[in-house]
Amino acid sequence: MKLEQLNFHHLFYFWRVARSGHLTRTADELRTSQSAVSAQIRQLEERIGEKLFTREGRRLLLTDSGQMVLAYADNIFGLGQEMLGRLQGRTAGITRLRVGSVATLSRNYQENWIRPLLSDASLVLTLESGLLEGLIARLVQHQLDVVLANETVPADPERPLHCRFLGSQSIVLVGPAERWRGRTLRVPQDLDGLDIALPGPRHALRTQFDALCATAGVTPKLRAEVDDMAMLRLIARDSGWLTVLPEVVVQDELVAGSLVRVGHSAGLQERFYAITTPHRLRIEVLDRLLSAAPLALDG
């Protein structure tokens, strides 16, 4: 089949149905009839010689061929949306950088990473937070330019991604200054039975910490487990408990003296990554950030 034989109008209707899983809903969204949508998909199937959907009750499920076509359609129409956004921005004399970050990532780290861009009057930043898989899906659909994460993504030939190491830092044990100033604890050996707040199970460093405690035969008294680093920062500041977290999360409290470092372990490290697609459009400000040498954040 030659490229000129592919009707992108048919492909667009398929794409919308594949994403919703419903003919009627898609027809309503496109303000057309269900029969018109069905006809478009049927003509696409005839063109490519493959069935794209099977029916299960009221839902349409993608066949293997349908899954492959959807992957290409996501790229085609995602790039189209990106192109329009870039053209609109260029007309207005601005650059838009769309950054996604996993919900467990420190907001202080994100701000440190984008700080070189904050003085650029021609730049508009869009910052989103969410679960890694949802952000990666938006990245693949060209709705984000980069995803900041504290873990890598598994290799997948059907979804090629570039994962660039940005830097790392030790995880610290902090406590309220009035109780812990001048005192030091070994991590994890001295934590048995102590009140402690930890990152939630979805955070990349939680597995590391639990493994260290299990190996040492130590059981701290868990008082809170928190996915969101901004909330964990507040708990560290206000609870009176010890807290294990990336130092960058509480950098302001450490400088102000309300919290102090009580201990750390070389076995606990948070690593930061920038994830992009290999076929993304080049954005100069993003390229500058990505080409910077990996940053060691210990200190």
Image (cartoon, helix red, strand yellow):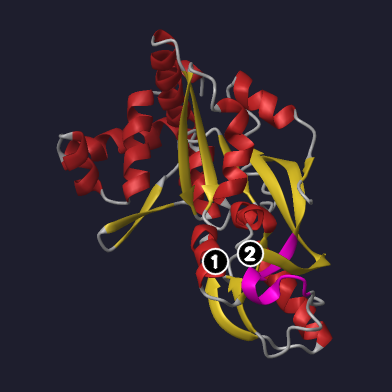
From the viewer's side, name the closer residue of 210 and 240.
240
The verdict on residue 196 being magenta is no
From the top left corner, tell me how far across and down residue 68 is, in percent: 52, 42
- Badge 1 crowding class, 10 Å Cα cut-off, few under 14, some 14 to 19, many 20 or more, is many
From the top left corner, tell me how far across and down residue 166 is, in percent: 73, 41
From the viewer's side, name the closer residue of 105 and 180.
180
Is label 2 in a helix, a strand or a loop?
Answer: strand
Asked whether residue 57 is in view, the answer is yes
- Badge 2 crowding class, 10 Å Cα cut-off, few under 14, some 14 to 19, many 20 or more, is many
- Magenta range: 171-183
Is label 1 in a helix, a strand or a loop?
Answer: helix
For the residue marked with disc 1, what is the amino acid? Answer: Arg
From the top left corner, tell me how far across and down residue 71 is, in percent: 51, 40
Q: Given contact means CB atoms under 8 Å apart, are the residues at marks 1 and 2 in contact?
A: yes
| Residue 85 in which image quadrant | top left
From the viewer's side, name the closer residue of 225 and 238.
238
Numbered badge on residue 237 = 1
The verdict on residue 177 being magenta is yes
From the top left corner, tell me how far across and down residue 251 is, in percent: 64, 53
Question: Where is 255 relative to 163, above or below?
Answer: below
Q: Residue at x 42, y 14 (%)?
A: 87
Question: Where is 18 relative to 219, above or below?
Answer: above
Q: Residue at x 65, y 57 (%)?
A: 254
Question: Where is 249 relative to 109, above or below?
Answer: below
From the viewer's side, name the closer residue of 117 and 98.
117
Tell me the CA gap for discs 1 and 2. Answer: 7 Å
Relative to 134, is 278 on the left or the right? Answer: right
Dot 1 or dot 2, earlier in sequence: 1
Residue indicated by mark 2: 259
Q: Residue at x 66, y 52 (%)?
A: 153
